[in-house]
Image (cartoon, grey):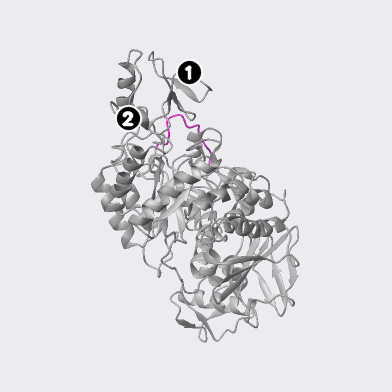
Amino acid sequence: MKKRIQALLLALAMLVSIPAAGCAGKDGAEVSTENSSISEVNSETVVKENAMFAANSGELQVLDDNYRTFYEVFLYSFYDSDGDGIGDIPGLIEKLDYINDGDDSTDTDLGMNGIWLMPIMPSTTYHKYDVKDYKDIDPEYGTLEDFKRLMEECDKRGIHVIIDLVMNHTSSQHPWFLEARQYLSGLNGAEPSEEECPYYGYYNFIQEQTNSSYCQLGDTGWYYEAPFWGEMPDLNLKNPAVQTEFEEIVDFWLDLGVDGFRLDAAKEFYSGAADSNVEVLTWFNDMVKAKKEDAYIVAEVWTDLATYAQYYASGIDSCFDFEFADKDGTIANVAKGLSGASVYGSKQEELQSTIGAYNENYIDAPFYTNHDMGRSAGYYSGEDSEAQTKIAGAMNLMMSGSAFVYYGEELGMKGAGKDENKRAPMQWSSDASAGGMCKGPSDMDEITMKFGSLEEQEEDDASVYNYYKQAVRLRNMYPAIARGTVAFEEELSDDALCVVTKTYGEDAIGLFFNISAEEKTVDISSYSIGDSGELTVGGMLLTGENAVTLEGETLTLPAYSVVLLK
């Protein structure tokens, strides 16, 4: 195996015009190639199949800040530790080494250094977005002791954990709502008073139904706001008593070790009133940062860039970048050829200026899919569908900010239509009865996966899984990928090729994306990166057998490939 790796590195060095006297090993040490026996392996085949692995074998530089690579986990469908078919916290602990084992010298983990846990608090539903108790763990998922152990194990591996905090609404079974309901039921026409029942002021009650977002409260003559679902009554987040409740809730989870919060439905705190929503977020951000200065806060504001950029005025770190996500977002449209490759670069420049106008310290939160969207493998069809699935994932991971990946996207899982289908069991095995496999939501349709399970993909160098691992590795090798300021190189870009330069302090890199089914040859004689002098290949992502080549000032990119120049 050692000789095979040496031969591979030598072949790659010759391919990309890197001096072949020695190559940087995984730990940064020089690996000699002088005595390698190239005759023992067909070097042409190795280069075609594994040039990507060799090109990305440099030393990792993972910085400990809030620019991270997050893995979104839906516990219910992730890994089952006790055989009841429902994923749980002990199951996640068992699979932490899959996400990140904490050892940079290994290559068996994904390399993610952040986890976003979808709701984990007691609830009446499988999705758990209707919270009954903000200071506990849903029994289906485990106990608070299990959660404490999860925090300890994540800390050992350098994984930051943020939890979903659902502030827009509670469950109709939350004690606050039950108290308010009981109080209003006994008024018998009298005027309500928050002095008599503070919980009356926790929600938005009216006596005349003004629109369909208000639901009737039994036979009390009152209505309550619940636009998402009648069992999810909206909270009045400007009520000081409600804010005090959430201050205590934040204290509770910070004390348990969480590193931040994902705020659900921030656009709907006060629907249609962005200024009021920004006011709530400003209060929340200031409150949390006073308790934990480096806490990371990301808000879901599902709308267009021009609108969610305004939410950065609150001071929060991030809003999810919906402009690039979903089946008709920038990434998918470019990967499908519906938009030119240049759009991917120009949009990144646009978001910088748009968001930066509200908060110069923002951290973008690019993502490609999540639990509310169809799985990306279903976006593409035809002979290029696998390559498109791969490069679209890379386009997300090569963006600046804290990138988010939904569990199973690294396997090319499928699932679309109703929400249950989008939250199918993690495909550890193709055998649904294998240990740890989850049953998934009860109303989920039968889903045929396109690219197979982890068991089938992990030994295949050309799999979607191994491609994602290489993309995350490249992100971990170059801090400028996540933290760099983007300059779109319009003169080099066209409908098939997108070129961006990223600058982070004194470091600069160039990213070239061939988002087409044809090979692209680029004259880079006019392209430079700072004072770097001669450009070299620093990494590549390949979807086919052919490798990127750099010969003099001619760069050749095979179909659906990415190359990093430095």
Locate residue 326, reporting x and y percent.
59, 45
Residue at 46% over, 60% down: 68
Q: Is residue 408 above or below residue 214?
A: below
Q: Main secondary structure of the magenta part?
A: loop
Residue at 34% over, 20% down: 184
Name the residue at the left extreme: 145
Q: Is residue 93 visible from the viewing direction of this image?
A: yes
Secondary structure found at label 1: loop
Total numbered circles: 2
Q: Give the magenta part as a residue range.
A: 439-449
Q: Is residue 59 above or below residue 83?
A: below
Q: Nearer the viewer, residue 313 or 387?
A: 313
Q: Residues within 10 Å of mark 2 (few under 14, many from 20)?
A: many
Question: Which residue bears the numbered disc 2?
Answer: 199
Secondary structure found at label 2: helix
Tag of residue 208: 1
Amino acid beneath label 1: Glu
Residue at 51% over, 47% down: 452
Locate residue 455, reporting x and y percent.
45, 51
State which quadrant residue 63 falls in.
Answer: bottom left
N-terminal-most mark, 1 or 2: 2
Q: Residues within 10 Å of mark 1 (few under 14, many from 20)?
A: few
Locate residue 412, reporting x and y percent.
54, 48
